[in-house]
Amino acid sequence: MMTTIEKESITLMSTTTTTEPSKTKIIEPSRTTTTTTTTIKPLSANLPDLISLDSIDGVIYGVHGTRINQDSQASEPGTWYNNYHQSTPPANACDGDTSTKYLHFGACSEGGNDMTCGLDTGFYLELKRGAAVVTGLQICTADDFPERDPLTISLEGSNQSGAALTLGSSWALIYNGDSGLETDTDRFTCGNVQQINNSIQYKSYRFLVSSKRGPGSSVQYSELKLFGY
């Protein structure tokens, strides 16, 4: 084995190796392409929250013969002048249910048929949740007779409570204008949300109707919705 190893060693030593000129491969710096994925989120509509109309004392106070900044005239259930129908009290406008309604005869009785019937009526309440900033409102239609739909409305705010809310001087006007029901909509349907430019918080609110769609015995609506924070 020693001889074999030596022979192999000699052979290896006498072997002529031809080496080609070195070819150097230039490796360019790696170019990394970074793909950035941008997720574009849809713009938020910034819709305000729905404000609960639960009242602090559990009562929604119906009014008649009442205009902006005037003293509130208390209404009672019945079918005569200045009454709201006993089956459709003002609380129905604040219960979140469009299958119920608030109907008021105003200066008329149940058999009336005039453009003035039901006008200058509405309600007021003190919020159970405490003060809120209202920035929008919405009215929903009731079950029958489109001519009873309110067309012009107002909303006032106050930081008074109890008996002081009967005084016109307690209220500050927040909104006076269209109801959002200018187009005759289907029954049990909510109209356009009316935006309100307001930044003042109030704990009490008064809602009034000053015009309606057509002649009839009353004004009616299933819901008043207030939006804000």
Image: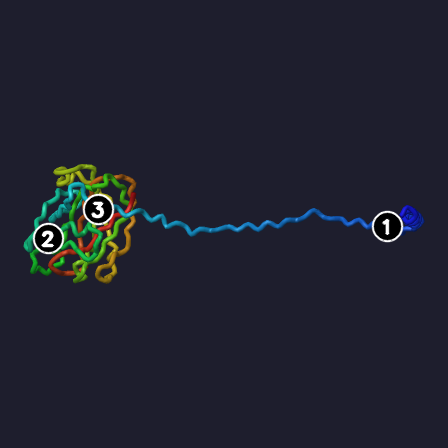
Identify the image quadrant of the C terminus: top left
- Mark toward the start of the polypeptide (1 vs 2): 1
SS for callout 3: loop
- Mark toward the start of the polypeptide (1 vs 3): 1
Q: Position of residue 213 (x, y in %)?
A: 19, 59
State the residue at coordinates (22%, 52%): 96
Indicate the amino acid at tag 3. Answer: Leu
* In the displayed structure image, the side of residue 137 where residue 105 appears, left or right: left
**Disc 3 residue crowd, few under 14, some 14–19, many 20+, Cα 10 Å:** many
Q: Residue furthest front?
A: 1
SS for callout 1: loop
Q: Which residue is mark 1?
A: 21
Q: CA–CA distance between discs 1 and 2?
A: 109 Å
* In the displayed structure image, the side of residue 37 where residue 201 appears, left or right: left
Q: Which residue is mark 3?
A: 53
State the residue at coordinates (77%, 50%): 25
- Mark toward the start of the polypeptide (3 vs 2): 3
SS for callout 2: strand
Residue 113, disc: none
Indicate the amino acid at tag 1. Answer: Pro
Q: Is residue 174 above or below residue 78?
A: above
* In the displayed structure image, the side of residue 145 where residue 8 appears, left or right: right
Indicate the amino acid at tag 2. Answer: Tyr
Q: CA–CA distance between discs 1 and 3?
A: 93 Å
Q: Position of residue 125 (x, y in %)?
A: 17, 43
Q: Is residue 101 above or below residue 173?
A: below
How many numbered discs, if any? Answer: 3
Quadrant of the rendered structure where residue 56 is?
A: top left
Mark 1 or mark 2, whichever is nearer to me: 1
Q: Which residue is mark 2?
A: 84
